[in-house]
Image (spheres, rainbow, N blue to C red):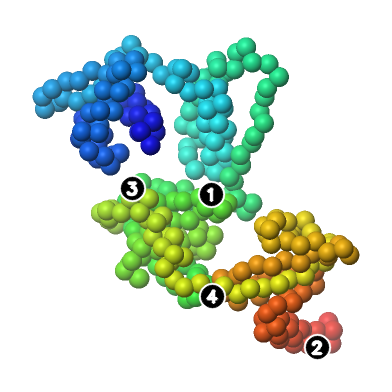
Amino acid sequence: MKLERLLTITILLLNRKRVQAQELADQLEVSLRTIYRDLDSLGQAGIPIVSYTGMEGGYEIMDSFRLDRQLLSYDELTALFTALRGLESTKAYDGSNMDLLLGKVGAMVAQAERGRTGEGDSIHIDFAPWRSSDEDQTRYDSLRQAVNERKLIRFKYTSRTNGEQEREVEPMALVLKNYAWYLHGYCCLRDDYRIFKLTRIRELRVTSKPFIRRAESLAQLNDRWKAPERNEPKEEIAAVLRFNASAAASVMDQFDEKEIERLPDGRILVRKLYSNEGWLIRTAFHYLTDVEVLEPAAIAAKVKQTALEIADKYDGLDAEY
């Protein structure tokens, strides 16, 4: 943690003309005494930090100092460059700013790469979601603007439990999770913080009405997002599924290796704990005829009943056409 804190202080001082010790303490959530020790450690490491007293006082790094590859190894620079290219794929930041940043880091990589042979790009990260359209990009850009300008937004939102409802929200932050974008916001309808998946937002309107941002940080909002999983009791249904061999590739994508048992005839058994029966039933219909629910019998019966209800919807279809 100390090494990470020291690097953070160095970056802050390089990017700012002068920073006060109290500001560093508040941002890093440590005491002033810890900040003073860290600044002393940086000085002993050879980073020329100068202190100034008075109302405009603080700490700064001498103008002659430059961040070079001595602070970051070749592997660290390459990892940083790869991560930035992955972030670029999300279109989360202005293209010109990202190009400039990539150019700077890329130049550092090129300098560190001199004298190394037989090495090249070995990892590519792409965070872009599979679904992407001009409408999705416009929605994202509007929400990002609303977050930055602290403007109240209104939209229609479809949830799994309440269907479509009109929402009025104070947008707090945008989060990319598992190839999908989400909005952290304070929902005036629920009078509490909520998470909104961007693909379920319709008829988005950014109003001219400003709001005062609430105190919660992004880290706190993310903790609230995870909190229900920790606090609510889990149903945990022990399921046994048998898949046809033709579904093997998809099964390997969907399930952990420890949950998979390969049978001599090529079929696959999967033993998995599901948090609720809805997810288990949806899994069964996702694989259609390539899967059979062996256990529990009650869920297998529900899958069968649901399949019959689906079939009833198509009764008389041949007669109509």
Q: Is residue 81 visible?
A: no
Badge 1 element = helix
- For mark 3, what is the residue? 149
* Residue type (three-letter) at the residue carrying disc 2: Gly
Residues under numbered marks 2 and 1 in contact, where contact means CB atoms less than 8 Å apart: no
Q: Nearer the viewer, residue 311 or 290?
A: 290
Of the numbered discs 3 and 2, the one sitting upstream in the chain is 3
Type of amino acid at the residue the image marks with label 3: Glu
Give 95 or 11, whichever is nearer the viewer.
11
Please state the horizontal and vertical placement of residue 59, each as a whole percent of the image.
23, 24
For the point 78% across and 87% down, which residue is it? 315
The residue identified by callout 4 is 235
Query: Label 4 vs label 1: CA separation?
Result: 38 Å
Q: Which residue is mark 1?
A: 137
Q: Which residue is drawn at the image coordinates 36% and 46% (left, top)?
A: 148
Identity, as a three-letter code, of the amino acid under mark 4: Glu
Q: Nearer the viewer, mark 4 or mark 1?
A: 4
